Image: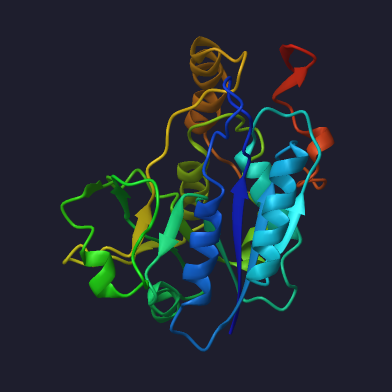
Amino acid sequence: MKITTVTPTKIFRTKDGGYSRNIERIEAQLKSLRSQKTNAKIYPIISDLSGDLEIIEQFKKICKKYDAKYINTETNLVWNKPLALNIGIKASDSNSDLIISLDADIVLRQNVIKKCLLKKSNNNVIVCQTYMYNEDMYNFKDFSKKSFEKCRGEGRFLNLSGNGGLQCFDREWLFRVRGYDERYSLWGGIDNEIIKRAKFDKKEVVWLNGINKEILLIHLEHSKHMIPGLSREFVSNYKHKYNVKYYRSKWVSAIVNPKSWGNAKRVVGPRRVGEDFIIK
């Protein structure tokens, strides 16, 4: 069994010159993937929309260390998670049976991939309830059940609408439906939307955690930095004018993107032009 994981990311400079996210969390995720107790071959991809050369070089070093493919896409799009995911999906190993998308702030317990394989069938998609950890880094020595249980009481589980920490699909299905919906720019709705389409396409949604609420995914805490010059009002207005509208639409097909999906130039969304933000 061969599995490609795809992690979308973009890190930018904040007003004080710092980073919007701690880059080391990507290393923690890759380390957790390389610690998986499974016979499956895992091919990690980090699909990055960052534009800062210093950040890009740090990503390259981390990915080289853990034998992960690093893809940087030059674009003035503010943030489009489905595009970053689709770029990674299209670059996935053609022999992969499954694609697993991962949030950039996630670390995995060492048996998560094994659990995915036990539950996966041609007729389902796999998701996993995420534990929102109060710390901004994973500081334990390993990714065992014992280590993860130490986090209990130091955070909370997301409700079932928060299903984007891990999503596992047949690679063939993702290519057939042309990936994630690239109309969803900025934040909100993307993860729920593809699950909605999977259900529309007669796929069962299977959760990994079980009745005992095992901690399988840890989401590391992070500051809520806004992109300099982009107001919260702009983000809120965009979300309700566009993302919510798309989510509430009725599907007549599980396919939403054109044949040229995974192409940054054709995506419509907020872009930075000089000091201004325009929707193009």
Using residue 73 as the reference point, say whether residue 135 is left or right of it.
left
Q: Is residue 250 above or below residue 272?
A: below
The extreme bottom residue here reads 39
Q: Position of residue 266 (x, y in %)?
A: 82, 34
- Whether residue 254 appears in this view of the structure is no
Q: Is residue 182 above or below residue 107?
A: above
Q: How many marks?
A: 0
Q: Residue at x 71, y 67 (%)?
A: 64
Quadrant the N terminus occupies? bottom right
Q: Residue at x 58, y 19 (%)?
A: 15
Q: Is residue 87 above or below residue 30?
A: above
Using residue 113 as the reference point, say whether residue 57 is left or right of it.
right
Q: Nearer the viewer, residue 200 or 40?
A: 40
Q: Nearer the viewer, residue 103 or 150?
A: 150
Q: Position of residue 199 (x, y in %)?
A: 45, 53
Q: Residue at x 59, y 23 (%)?
A: 227
Q: Quadrant of residue 270?
A: top right
Q: Position of residue 16 (x, y in %)?
A: 57, 22
